[in-house]
Amino acid sequence: MLIDTHVHLDPYSQKEIEEILCRATNEDVKIVISAGTTLDSSKKNIEYSKIFPQFFTGVGIHPMDLIEPFSEKHDNELRDLIRNHEKVIVMSEIGLDYLPDMPDRAWQFNAFRKQISIARDFKLPIIFHSREAHRDCFRVLKEEKAYEVGGVMHYFQGSLYDAQAAIDSGFYISIARPLFRIDELQDVVKNISLDHIVIETDSAPQPFKKNRENWTEPRHLRSILLKISELKDLSTQEVEETIFENTKKLLSKRWKSIESTFV
Ligand SMILES: [Zn+2]
């Protein structure tokens, strides 16, 4: 069975999620971890996790969604969400984004550091976002001792050097659909050990794609796995088993929460 370690399903209606999860199950994708991007989106994910057994969540405030400085209120609310809901199994999505017109960098740093600290207090793996900000991410992760909980550099698109830096920081790298179009990413996958890889679709509504059938969904996860096995010249079974074990290790004691409700 496959686990989609990073999606954003909370913008969908309950009915649409039901259909998405049904299509996913038909492709053997049996667990999804849906990341929060704001307090509201984190709460909505938690509500859905109560409805669908295969739906697990992360909580966190995405660097792109910082409309104000990260405050004590945010801190307390996130802690309450983690404390009170056992299907919250990762701190996600947090990180740094240096594209033009992104929120103030001082706000981003502060929110990233504070949320790493929450993750450490609750021993939650960290799923982080980095756009044009890899060096600073690795530095902050180190300074804030994120290696104590580890996690994932999500939607990885970087060099072999970046991949190695993520691994050295105690993190997995998560491969998504860019693998089909970015040559450098294919080289990274060929050159790093499978032991450091997890997979995701980062599925979210894509209204800019006119044909609904072309929207990325968790059901597409297996195609990423097949591409990895092709690139590494390994059997799909071996790749599937190793990635499953990696995901289990990544989630550490939070794996129990999946096991108890599903496996
Ligand atoms: Zn995401």
Image (cartoon, rainbow, N blue to C red):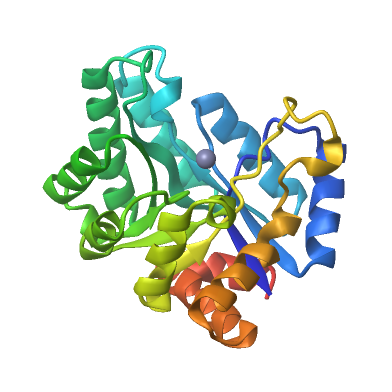
Report whether 207 appears left or right of 213: left
* Residue 125 is at least partly visible in this image: no
Question: Which image quadrant for residue 239?
Answer: bottom right
Q: Residue drawn 23% across and 27% down?
A: 110
Residue 157: % across, % down: 41, 49
Seen from the viewer's position, the closer of residues 98 and 47 is 98
Residue 223 to residue 129: above or below: below
Question: Which residue is depicted at the point 23% across and 36% down?
Answer: 113
Q: Is 166 rendered above or below residue 43?
A: below
- 136 vs 63, nearest the viewer: 136
In this rendering, is residue 190 above or below 71? Answer: below
Q: Residue furthest front?
A: 183
Identify which residue, 60 or 187, lies in the foreground.
187
150 left or right, relative to 228: left
Q: Residue at x 69, y 67 (%)?
A: 222
Asked which quadrant contains residue 96, the reply is top left
At which x and y percent is residue 53? Answer: 73, 58
The residue positioned 87% from the left and 48% from the top of the image is 19
The reply to whether residue 177 is visible in this rendering is yes
Image x and y of residue 230, in percent:
58, 76
